Amino acid sequence: MTPDAQPSRTALLSAAARAAHLLVDDHPAIFTDPLAHRLLGERAEELLSYHQVYGSHPALSGARTSVVTRSRYTENRLAEMAVDQYVILGAGLDSFAYREARPDDLRVFEVDKPATQRWKKKLLAEAGITTPETVEFVAVDFEKDPALTSHLVQAGFDPNRPALVSWLGVTMYLTEEAISQTLHAISGLAPGTELIVEYLLPAELRDEAGQAYAELVMAAAAAHGEPWQTFLSAEQMAALLRDHLLEPREHVRQKDIPVEWKRGDALRPTELSILTRARVRESSPATDPTAGADSPTNTRRKPPAPQP
Ligand SMILES: C[S@@+](CC[C@H](N)C(=O)[O-])C[C@H]1O[C@@H](n2cnc3c(N)ncnc32)[C@H](O)[C@@H]1O
């Protein structure tokens, strides 16, 4: 089988790390994903036992730190923004859309490669998790298909209304060309739309723990057909965003996530990945000037409570 015909192994490992966080790390949890465990299906015992037995190994504690901090930041921002459209690029086994606490009027557009989406639908069905009508699966390969917006629109996305777009744990697997094409598409969405993108720092900008994690994980990812390809500094990401008329608002490191970092468990913030939050500018030339008729301020919903 070609890598494209296989579901993403890194998506499975990310879900395992979210599930394991609730089993092996201190409470209160940094991020609670109540469905991750069930989504692992028949692999749950095997994958979770690694974390239970070797949970302080840097490859495992680093993975847990990474997935829970990025999801916590992103879902808190989603709650603050109170938009009614959420696009998850490279959604993998993200469970936001299937949780009981999700807002009823929030439409979720999950974008990923077709094989990973087929596998996710099977895992959801096997776990008895219902897919709400507010969720759309949008099959796009960022490397092969630049028409992200038209696929979203075909699935019911309204490009004239603001959205949150998250892109967590994905850009490192892409070429710079695919990243640029996707940023171009996002820059054409409605003003006020925000993007939260995660990316990996080049080796010279990592701290010791970040470099150690990279050395442990990078070779395994490549061996399983998902090599890390692109590394960017915060300055490079900011420049790339500005090239695409997106306005960088903040760069967030793991240590910036407002949680208690003096911990009894093995989670420690490292300097390896950054989350950058950017906004589609009011004056973006790619934006439809007639969009004002559908004023987003008229359609704001009551936000869900952010995770503490
Ligand atoms: C590490 S997983 C992250 C999944 C999810 N965002 C999370 O935080 O759990 C990377 C995801 O990116 C997706 N991905 C990688 N390359 C892609 C591409 N060229 N086009 C679309 N999706 C891609 C994979 O299928 C996988 O679901």
Image (spheres, rainbow, N blue to C red):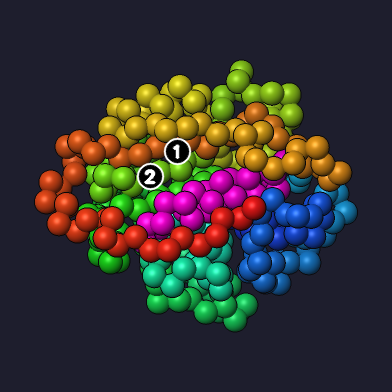
User: Cβ of disc 2 within 8 Å of ligand 1?
Assistant: no
Which residue is depicted at the point 78% across and 67% down? 45
Q: Give the alpha-carbon distance from disc 1 to disc 2, as whole Å.
A: 7 Å
Query: Which one is in front, 64 or 251?
Result: 251
Residue 298: x percent and y percent? 26, 60
Q: Name the residue under label 1.
A: 277
Which numbered disc, 1 or 2, marks the residue that appears first in the sequence?
A: 2
Q: Name the residue under label 2.
A: 194
Which residue is depicted at the point 88% across and 54% down? 53
Q: Residues within 10 Å of mark 1 (few under 14, many from 20)?
A: many
- Left or right: 185 in relation to 34: left
- Left or right: 138 in relation to 208: left
Q: Mark 2 is on which residue type?
A: Glu
Which residue is depicted at the point 63% across and 31% down? 272
Q: Which numbered dot is residue 225?
A: none
Asked whether the residues under the numbered discs 1 and 2 touch, taking CB atoms below 8 Å apart as contact, a structural biologist would say yes
Quarter holding residue 33:
bottom right
The kind of secondary structure element at disc 2 is strand
Rendered position, 34 above or below 133: above
Provide the major secondary structure of the magenta segment. Answer: helix
Query: Which one is in front, 43 or 239?
Result: 239
Do we see residue 264 in this rendering? yes
State how many labels appear. Answer: 2
Please tell me whether residue 71 belongs to the stretch shown in magenta. Answer: yes
Q: Mark 1 is on which residue type?
A: Arg
Do we see residue 223 in this rendering? no
User: In the rendered structure, which segment of residues is drawn in magenta?
Assistant: 62-87
Residue 177: x percent and y percent? 35, 35
Residue 186: x percent and y percent? 31, 44
The kind of secondary structure element at disc 1 is strand
Rendered position, 117 above or below 210: below
Query: Which one is in front, 167 or 120?
Result: 167
